C-alpha cells in the first residue's frame, strides 16, 4: 500500500472520530468499549492485508456504538480513495494474478474451517489456470516461429498498367535476344556446311601438274586431227557410247597390268614430240577430254562445234595399287573390249610374326590382416556438481513436481539432496516410455538434462525429448507438454530475451 492510500485512510478515520465526538453519546455500548477501551485510536490503526482488502469492499452505513443519523457514504477500503474537503478521488484497482487469488483463497479455506468442496473447487481452478498458461505458451511459440519465418511474397491480384508495360518490354527484349541467338546459330551452321562442301570439292579435284595443264581452256573451236587416235577410233562401232565424249581406252602391257587414259584430241599447244613420249603419262591414271558433249547427243555436238570449248573437268580416277613393272612398257597399243578398271594385283601373303612369350607376373603378396579395432569407450554420464544453485533447484523440484516423479514419496522438506535426486532422475530417465507412464520418464529426462548442462536453448531441449519419445509412437508430443507443465508449475521458465529461447530453472 502506498503512502497516498495510507494518508487517505488516516484522514477518513480522523473525520469519522471528529464527527462521532461532536455527537451526544447516551451510553457507551459494549462493542465500542470492547474495541476501543482505554487505548488510543492511533495505536489500533494499521494497514489492511491483501486478503482483508479482497474480503471487504465497502464500509457499512451502521456504525456500532454510535446513535444518531450517519451520512451513508460508501468508501472503498484499500482502493486509495482520498477523502478531504468533500471531494473523493478513486484509483483503479490493480489486476491481481490468478494464482495469487487462488492461493489466498486456499489459505483462507485451510485456516477458517474444513470445506472440502471449496478446496477441491479451488484446486480444479488452479489446474485449469496451469493448463491455460501452458496453452498460451504453446501459442506464443507458434506465433514466434511464424514471425521468424520468411514472409511470403504477396503479388497484387490486378497488376497495374505500368507493370504490364514493363512485362511487355521485358518479353520483347527476351524475344530479340532469342532471335539474335537463332540468327547466330544459323550462320554457324551455314559456315560449317560451306566448309564441309569446300573440303569435299577439294578432295575430288586432282592437283597434279599434268591434270592442271589439261584443264586449261582451249581457245577457239579448232581441232587438230590426231592420226594415232583416228586409227583407234575407226575400229570401234558406230553407236558405241565410248566413241563420243569421255572416251577411255585402256592400253595394257603383256606382263604388267598397267593402264593409262588416252585423250581423243590433244590441245593445240601439244606438239608431236610431247605426244610421242609415252613415259610422260602417269601409270594408273585415267583422264577424260570432254570435246564433243554427252553420249548420244548429236545436236549438242553441232552446237559445241560452233562455240568455243569451256573448261574441262577431269573425272575422279579409281585407286589403283602401283607395283614395279617386271618388263619395259610397250608402246604398241592393244585394244580392249571393256573399259572396266583392271583389278589390283594380289599381294603375296605375309607370314605372321610369332606371338611374344607370355611372362607370368610374380605372385601377389597377400594383403595384411586387419587388426581388430578396440571398442569405443562408453560415454560416462555427466556428474552433477553440488552447488548452492543445484541444491536450490533440487529443493524446488521436490516442492513442485515431487508427486509427479514419485507419487508414493513422503520426503520431508527440502527433500533429498542433490546426489540422491540425480540418481532418482537417472533411474527414471533410463526407463522406456512404452513400458511405463511417459510423464514421469519425460519429466525426469528434462530435469536431469538441465541439472547436467545448466540453462540450455529450447531447440536442444526439444531434441533431447524427441530422442526419448522415439521409443513409443504414442508418446509423440508428450515431451513438450511435460516441459510446459513444469513452466506452468513455476519450476522452469523460458527466457526469450536473446536470439533464441533459453530454458532455465525458475
Image (spheres, rainbow, N blue to C red):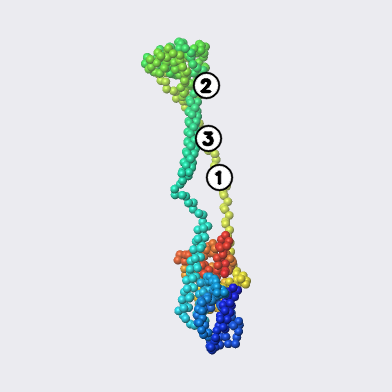
Report, in whole angstroms, how far the alpha carbon at label 2 lies from the one at label 1.
55 Å
- Assess whether mark 3 and mark 2 are in contact (beta carbons under 8 angstroms): no
Task: List the single residue furthest toward the right.
Answer: 387
Report, in whole angstroms, how far the alpha carbon at label 3 lies from the one at label 1.
21 Å
Which residue is painted at 37% across and 16% down in the image? 239
Q: Is residue 102 above or below residue 279?
A: below
Q: Is residue 112 above or below residue 354?
A: below
Q: Earlier in the sequence, mark 3 or mark 1?
A: 3
How many neighbours does mark 3 have within 10 angstroms: few (below 14), some (14-19), or many (20 or more)? few
Which residue is painted at 47% across and 23% down in the image? 317
SS assignment at label 3: loop
- Image quadrant where residue 336 sits: top left
How many neighbours does mark 2 have within 10 angstroms: few (below 14), some (14-19), or many (20 or more)? few
Which residue is painted at 45% across and 19% down in the image? 288
Residue 135, image x, y percentages: 48, 66
- Image quadrant where residue 335 sits: top left
- Assess whether mark 1 and mark 3 are in contact (beta carbons under 8 angstroms): no
Residue 146, image x, y percentages: 50, 58
Residue 424, image x, y percentages: 55, 73
Q: Earlier in the sequence, mark 2 or mark 3?
A: 2
**Which part of the image, by quadrant, shows the C terminus?**
bottom right
- Judge depth for marks 2 and 3 and give the one in front: 2
Which residue position is annotated with label 3?
353
Q: Which mark is residue 148?
A: none
Which residue position is annotated with label 1?
360
Which residue position is annotated with label 2?
208
**Which part of the image, by quadrant, shows the N terminus?**
bottom right
- Whether residue 167 is visible: no
- Whether residue 8 is visible: yes
Residue 294, image x, y percentages: 40, 18
Amino acid at each position: 500500500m502506498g503512502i497516498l492510500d495510507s494518508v487517505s485512510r488516516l484522514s477518513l478515520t480522523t473525520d469519522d472520530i471528529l464527527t462521532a465526538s461532536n455527537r451526544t453519546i447516551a451510553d457507551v455500548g459494549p462493542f465500542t468499549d470492547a474495541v476501543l477501551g482505554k487505548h488510543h485510536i492511533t495505536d489500533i490503526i494499521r494497514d489492511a492485508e491483501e486478503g482483508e482488502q479482497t474480503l471487504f469492499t465497502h464500509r457499512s452505513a451502521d456504525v456500532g456504538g454510535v446513535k444518531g443519523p450517519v451520512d451513508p457514504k460508501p468508501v472503498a477500503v484499500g482502493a486509495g480513495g482520498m477523502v478531504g474537503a468533500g471531494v473523493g478521488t478513486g484509483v483503479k484497482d490493480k489486476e491481481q494474478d490468478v494464482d495469487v487469488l487462488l492461493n489466498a483463497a486456499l489459505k483462507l479455506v485451510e485456516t477458517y474451517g474444513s470445506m472440502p468442496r471449496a478446496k477441491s473447487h479451488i484446486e480444479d481452478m488452479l489446474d485449469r489456470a496451469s493448463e491455460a498458461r501452458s496453452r498460451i505458451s504453446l501459442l506464443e511459440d507458434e506465433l514466434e516461429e511464424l514471425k521468424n519465418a520468411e514472409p511470403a511474397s504477396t503479388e497484387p491480384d490486378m497488376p497495374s498498367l505500368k507493370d504490364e508495360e514493363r512485362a511487355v518490354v521485358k518479353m520483347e527484349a527476351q524475344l530479340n535476344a532469342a532471335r539474335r541467338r537463332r540468327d547466330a546459330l544459323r550462320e554457324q551452321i551455314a559456315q560449317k556446311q560451306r566448309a564441309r562442301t569446300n573440303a569435299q570439292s577439294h578432295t575430288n579435284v586432282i592437283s597434279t601438274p599434268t591434270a592442271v595443264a589439261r584443264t586449261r581452256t582451249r581457245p577457239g573451236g579448232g581441232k587438230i586431227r590426231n592420226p594415232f587416235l583416228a586409227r583407234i577410233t575407226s575400229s570401234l562401232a558406230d553407236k558405241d557410247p565410248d566413241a563420243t565424249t569421255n572416251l577411255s581406252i585402256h592400253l595394257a602391257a603383256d606382263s604388267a597390268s598397267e593402264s593409262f587414259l588416252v585423250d581423243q584430241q590433244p590441245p593445240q599447244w601439244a606438239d608431236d614430240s610431247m605426244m610421242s613420249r609415252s613415259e610422260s603419262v602417269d601409270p594408273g591414271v585415267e583422264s577424260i577430254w570432254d570435246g564433243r558433249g554427252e553420249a548420244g547427243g548429236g545436236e549438242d555436238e553441232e552446237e559445241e562445234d560452233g562455240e568455243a570449248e569451256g573448261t574441262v573437268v577431269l573425272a575422279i580416277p579409281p585407286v589403283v595399287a602401283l607395283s614395279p613393272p617386271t618388263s619395259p612398257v610397250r608402246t604398241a597399243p592393244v585394244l580392249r573390249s571393256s573399259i572396266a578398271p583392271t583389278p589390283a594385283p594380289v599381294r603375296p601373303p605375309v607370314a605372321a610374326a610369332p606371338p611374344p612369350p607370355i611372362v607370368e607376373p610374380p605372385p601377389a603378396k597377400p594383403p595384411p590382416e586387419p587388426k581388430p579395432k578396440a571398442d569405443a569407450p562408453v560415454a560416462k554420464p555427466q556428474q552433477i556438481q553440488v552447488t548452492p544453485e543445484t541444491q536450490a533447484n533440487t529443493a524446488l523440484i521436490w516442492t513442485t513436481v515431487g508427486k509427479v516423479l514419485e507419487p508414493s514419496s513422503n520426503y520431508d522438506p527440502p527433500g533429498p539432496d542433490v546426489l540422491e535426486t540425480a540418481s532418482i532422475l537417472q533411474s527414471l530417465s533410463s526407463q522406456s516410455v512404452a513400458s511405463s507412464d511417459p510423464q514421469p520418464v519425460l519429466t525426469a529426462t528434462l530435469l536431469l538434462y538441465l541439472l547436467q548442462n545448466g540453462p540450455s536453448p529450447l531447440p536442444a531441449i526439444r531434441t533431447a525429448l524427441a530422442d526419448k519419445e522415439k521409443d513409443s509412437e504414442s508418446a509423440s508430443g508428450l515431451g513438450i507438454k511435460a516441459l510446459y507443465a513444469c513452466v506452468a508449475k513455476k519450476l522452469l521458465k523460458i527466457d526469450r530475451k536473446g536470439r533464441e529461447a533459453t530454458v532455465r530453472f525458475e
